[in-house]
Image (spheres, grey):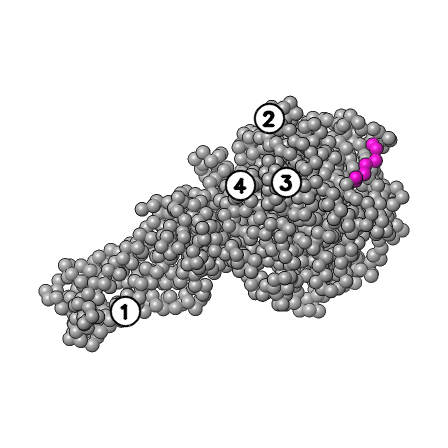
Amino acid sequence: MKLKLKIWRQKNGADAGAMVDYDLDNVSPDMSFLEMLDTLNEKLILDGDDPVAFDHDCREGICGSCGVVINGEAHGPEQTTACQLHMRAFSDGEEIIIEPWRAAPFPVIKDLVVNRSAFDRIIGAGGYITAPTGSAPEGNSTRIPKPDADEAFANATCIGCGACVAACPNGSASLFVSAKVTHLNLLPQGQPERTTRVLDMVEQMDAEGFGGCTNTGMCTVSCPKEIPFVSIANLNKEYRRAVKSGRKA
Amino acid sequence: MSEQTKFVGEGEFYRLGEAIADDKAPDGDVETRWERRKFASKLVNPSNRRKHKVIVVGTGLAGGAAGASLAEQGYHVVQFCFQDSPRRAHSIAAQGGINAAKNYRNDGDSIYRLFYDTVKGGDFRGRESNIYRLAENSVKIIDQCVAQGVPFAREYSGLLDTRSFGGVQVQRTFYARGQTGQQLLIGAYQALSKQIDAGNVEMHARHEMLDLIIIDGRARGIVARNLVTGELSTHLGDAVVLATGGYGNVFFLSTNAKGSNTSAIWRAHRRGAYFGNPCYTQIHPTCIPRSGDHQSKLTLMSESLRNDGRIWVPKEMGDTRSPDQIPEDERDYYLERIYPAFGNLVPRDIASRAAKNVCDEGRGVGPGGQGVYLDFADAIARMGEATVREKYGNLFDMYARITSENPYKQPMRIYPAVHYTMGGLWVDYDLQTTIPGLFAAGEANFSDHGANRLGASALMQGLSDGYFVLPTVLNNYIGSNKFAPVPTDAPEVTEVETLVKDRIEKLLSIQGDRTVDSFHRELGQIMWDYCGMARNDAGLRKAISEIRHLRDEFWKRVKVPGTGAELNQSLEKANRVADFIELGELMCIDALMREESCGGHFREESQTAEGEAERQDDKFSFVAAWEYGGEGRFGTVSGDPVLHQEELIFDYVHPAQRSYA
Amino acid sequence: MVETLSKNPRVTGFATLHRSTIGRKMIMAVTGLIMLAFVVVHMVGNLKIFFGETEFNEYAAWLRTIGEPALHEAWYLWIQRAVLTVALVLHIWAAVTLSRHDVNARPVKYHAKRKGGYATSTMRWGGVTLLLFIIWHILDMTTGTVNPATSHEPYERITAGFDQWWNVAIYTLAMVALCLHIWHGLWSAANTLGWNRATTAGFRTFAVFVALVVGFGFLLVPYSVVFGLVD
């Protein structure tokens, strides 16, 4: 396959950046999208150019490192991560536009690499169940109905890649926050911190500068782990409940 | 290399040093060793802990759990990961599950049985004391993770579900669908995040450790590079924990994450930490084969597929017909033929080697002949497609996504791939390396799996080390030592800083004609060909010579674009590959020295009449702890590595030869 | 008015709800539902026009007497107007501040065109359209400022107003905007208020149904005038 690539190049956070065109030959349809970028980079290095920086690690769709906007869609045309997207999803001679996640709380570090530490701060604000090592009761002492456990699991599969933010026209992190709130607030272990968790996480989400949810549903169709949209309703419900019961101290 | 090293002998590529022993595990009753060790440990007054800084490198299961637990105790933790977030460490990719001797099934499981299975599974090359402690802690791990909200699979009763795994006869594997590692890691990450938010952990993401600082013989700090700005910074503390994972990426293609590397433990090794059993590599039989030269990594598929799939290749060499055109009597179901008792369910190492053998005979299928069929046609005929879909649907989907073949219609193609490294930094019972104050945990140490790791045991070991062992042993270490403040301009500090800086400048200055990846691929090919599933004397010698040549080439011809003062992924890779090349050589030397077959290490010279691995307990019942050969720079080595043997003593589980025929 | 929500003090109860994005969304949802309730009743009341001029004018006059004798004449109407005005102002305030916050969250746009995501822009531009329409509608039917009718009788205002084709066009455009606004707004409000069935196919169909009934119900009147069913 032959491809015409248009890639966002930006030397660092202070640089203005621009789209740059590249032609790439000999692309195999069996390559993953990131292997296609590897191939381009090998060529760029030997030509004396700076290779394109992009985040990646496990390349099996679970670590959440990779993520670029491909032809306007987060992670590209299939509902998976960029590392699991293969070049057979494109056609010979196609033009592919590759851009970084765009959101104020995700500033570009270089080329396609963005800083997603805002997500870590949201988790730190309340996305946990306090259980200091050594304090745990016997694992089977609390039964959890299977449907609750399954729903908690479905929300816990979030990989924190940020595609929801990239896909949302408002750069909202609602799906990310809702997945964690739903996971932890559903479980009996999560009950003592149920109120403060959602209030603190939403407060941090706002403070980071993520946009608000306008219920477009763009997040959920871009989510490689298919976190359901109903989780956002659940976030709102938990929020309403928390505001009603009031923050203690 | 320390000045006290005495040589007691010499091999062709190494020198033999004095024997080494673990002096931390108490003697006597194995069931109370850890309890007694804990009681004998020194404690640190809670109000004093804040004054002690502990450096933790890595945020996977071992590092994340340790960072959170130490911070909860009150220590000031300074933690590092090269990823952009502590949540992304490669523990996240573990699929299958985590073993624990809970005996919820009432099927005869016990701590002792898990201990027994692990010693045996490790082919009698692990340490009994450590393994018993691992089995003991397994029970507490499940409790800890449930309390954190890890959504383990549950039965309709609301109780925790378990499944069987890896050929053991009890159902002791706890799981969260195919994403157990992810869920456990997120649990540890959340606990760590809480401590970061509270200011108890100072987290440095996108930072890579490049060297270790030793003062008065004790580990006191590290030099790290900020991967965004390129800035080098020195971090000093009272103890250093390396929880930086395994080194399977020495093979270039493996199931490891692209960033997984050996640099932290290799730099520690160069500073004096012994390296234990570097040649023990686990090669997993059911991975998706490579599709071409562009391949950048390999993807594992759970070995549970072998429960219902049948493995075969064509009987004739070079048969290029599509699988549906090959009639039944022209197929060779080789595992069922060679191992009628176990069939397709032989252990990982045997299944892997058999696949290699048929492919070497020229009967492999798919691109390059590097694959065998894993056929579900019989299973679909027997159980129906719906049942197969329910059991394996997510794996079939993953396969279809990567290969664009429909495994319901045509057999899958699989091939073995490097998956886990049992070797790592040598540690005593306290997880302390031969450098006082330097601890190694999780896959980064060598300790608990002997020569072969059982399925669902890696997660268990990482969390046992992180949640339960390190907090105790660090208390003891800090409680038993005095720590004078280290001036940032101490000569030991500035010397290391200069070395790190020089090395980066050297890498950037070569400006040769080959990319870092081209060297990494070549190294991987040498390792795979000669130090992979089957190893022999001639091959290993060839590998050592080729790696030495490659090392020289690397330092002459590598091309690293850009500067050191920016995000430079080529430079990051160059730093790692330079270390992989040195490690690869040591792996080959270790494999050459160990003239027996055991677990993941198969020496063709040491096999039974049936072609099975043959251990030689009289000669090799020891841990190989390697001391760095000499303080060479830029790939030059001033001396051969020094082998120290730790004799393995089996008081409880007595060595026996494995047989699966 | 706060430009960014990042430095707001904490939300501690309903009185401080306006400090967060979700809080503002909830304010927008509740005020939207209040206005929707009014719109539905308004639409149903309008249909009285098909019972003739006298009955319609009597109905309009009765509206001024609701709550009597406890309330003075037209007091109820003023209370309702006050509630609706407050709701409208809060709704617009929330919309404007949230929109600014949202736009700030994506300072650099994508080069590639993206598919989907029309709901948000439809709500924003539709909202502006509706605001302009409300002003026009009050000038037309309440104060009569722009209405050609000479009498103050409601029936005559309607027939005179809709005898002008361009006025019918304005109302048609506005009702299309209203339809879309209710369609997305109704289930969106339910979702924002945390009703986890808001996104089910059933409820979304219901939202479309309400939107169409309101839109068609309102448009029945002007088009009946145009086609001479009401004169």
Q: Chain of mark 3?
A: B
| Amino acid type, label 1 | Val
Q: Earlier in the sequence, mark 4 or mark 3?
A: 3
Q: Residues within 10 Å of mark 3 (few under 14, many from 20)?
A: few
| Amino acid type, label 4 | Gly
Residue that numbered label 1 is attached to: C41
Location of the C terminus of chain C (image quadrant): bottom left
Query: What segment is highlighted magenta in the picture?
Result: B17-23
Q: CA distance from mark 1 to mark 3?
A: 72 Å
Q: Residues within 10 Å of mark 2 (few under 14, many from 20)?
A: few
Query: Residue B126 in the image: x percent, y percent?
Result: 79, 46
Residue that numbered label 2 is attached to: B488
Q: Residues within 10 Å of mark 1 (few under 14, many from 20)?
A: few
As drawn, the label of residue B45 is 3
Residue that numbered label 4 is attached to: B199
Q: CA distance from mark 4 to mark 3?
A: 20 Å
- 3 vs 2, front mark: 3
Query: Residue C171 in the image: x percent, y percent?
Result: 24, 62
